[in-house]
Structures are given as C-alpha cells and as structure tokens.
Amino acid sequence: MLKIKKDFSFIVLVIPKILQIVLNISLVFLSIILSFLLVKELVISSQIMIESDTLDHQLFLASILTFFLYFEFIAMIVKYFKEQYHFPLRYFIYIGITAMIRLIIVEHNNPVHTLLYSLIILILIIGYFIMNLTPRERPDSSWFFKK
C-alpha cells in the first residue's frame, strides 16, 4: 500500500511539471509568431500611410488597433513569465476592450451592433474598476490541502 502511495505521489508531482514545460514551450512559439505578425502589421500600417493618396482612416485605425492587439498578447505572455506562470486578469480585459474598439471602427454599419459593442466595453470597464477595488492579496488556500 505504501509503494502505491509513493508511486502515485511521484506521478502527481511529475505530470504538472511536464504540462508546465509543454505550456511554456507553446507560449514561446506563440510569442514568436505574434512578434512576426506585429512587425507585419506595422509594415502594413506604414504602407497604408505612405502609399495611399487618399488615406483611408478606417483601414488605418483598424490596422493600428490590430497592432495593439498583437502587442497586448505579447505583453501578456511576457507578464505570464515574469509573474511566475500567472496570467493577470486585467490583460484579458485590456485585450477585450481593444478588440471591441477595433470592431466598432471596422463594423459600424449597424447602429444596434455598435450600441451593443459599446455596452460590452462599458461592462469590461466596470469589471476592471471592480477588480481594482478588491484587495490584491488572496486568502491562503493551503488549508484546503492540509489533512
């Protein structure tokens, strides 16, 4: 019985470490891909600005906001590694707000949809405000694992 318990505890310790390594490697590859897309979006934005005789403001703003989406995802991955394998919730809220603003700029033909997108932005901002009101320290969950 003791041997089975030892083997099980070894598996419980090893599997999360292996999964963490796979996740970290995947996030590094994703950040490399996002970096290439970020540079590509920067090139596209500058081409729109330089080559276009009549500047299409909607296309240019959509390109800039797409650039910021890539930038925020890369920043979130960097923060994940700096904060010891934790994604801060506020970065997801930033990305959601930026994505909704981009959607409003690109798809503003339907006023009802634009109003709904604006309400989504308001909800995200309220959520961010509430998140900042709560204390940063979380209760210790070690009591759950004690026997």
Image: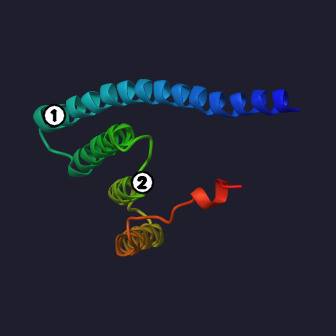
Task: Of the two numbered discs 2 and 1 on the same chain, state the one appearing first in sequence.
Answer: 1
| Residue at (44% x, 40% y) in the render | 85
Which three-letter amino acid code belongs to the residue tagged 2?
Phe
| 46 to 92, vertically: above or below | above
Image quarter of residue 89? bottom left
| 15 to 80, vertically: above or below | above
Image quarter of residue 128? bottom left
Disc 1 packing (10 Å; few <14; some 14–19; many ≥20):
some
Q: Position of residue 25 (x, y in %)?
A: 47, 24
Q: Secondary structure at mark 2?
A: helix
| Residue at (28% x, 48% y) in the render | 65
Q: Is residue 128 left or right of residue 12?
A: left
| Residue at (47% x, 67% y) in the render | 113
**Callout in the foreground (2, 1):** 2
Q: Position of residue 51 (x, y in %)?
A: 13, 31
Q: Position of residue 141 (x, y in %)?
A: 57, 59
Q: How far is the residue under mark 2 from the one under mark 1?
A: 27 Å
| Quadrant where the image shows the C terminus | bottom right
Which three-letter amino acid code belongs to the residue tagged 1?
Ser
The residue under label 2 is: 92
| Residue 46: assigned label | 1
Given residues 47 and 75, the one toward you in this image is 75
Disc 2 packing (10 Å; few <14; some 14–19; many ≥20):
some
| Quadrant where the image shows the N terminus | top right
Q: Position of residue 55 (x, y in %)?
A: 15, 45
Given residues 109 and 46, the one toward you in this image is 46
Q: Secondary structure at mark 1?
A: helix
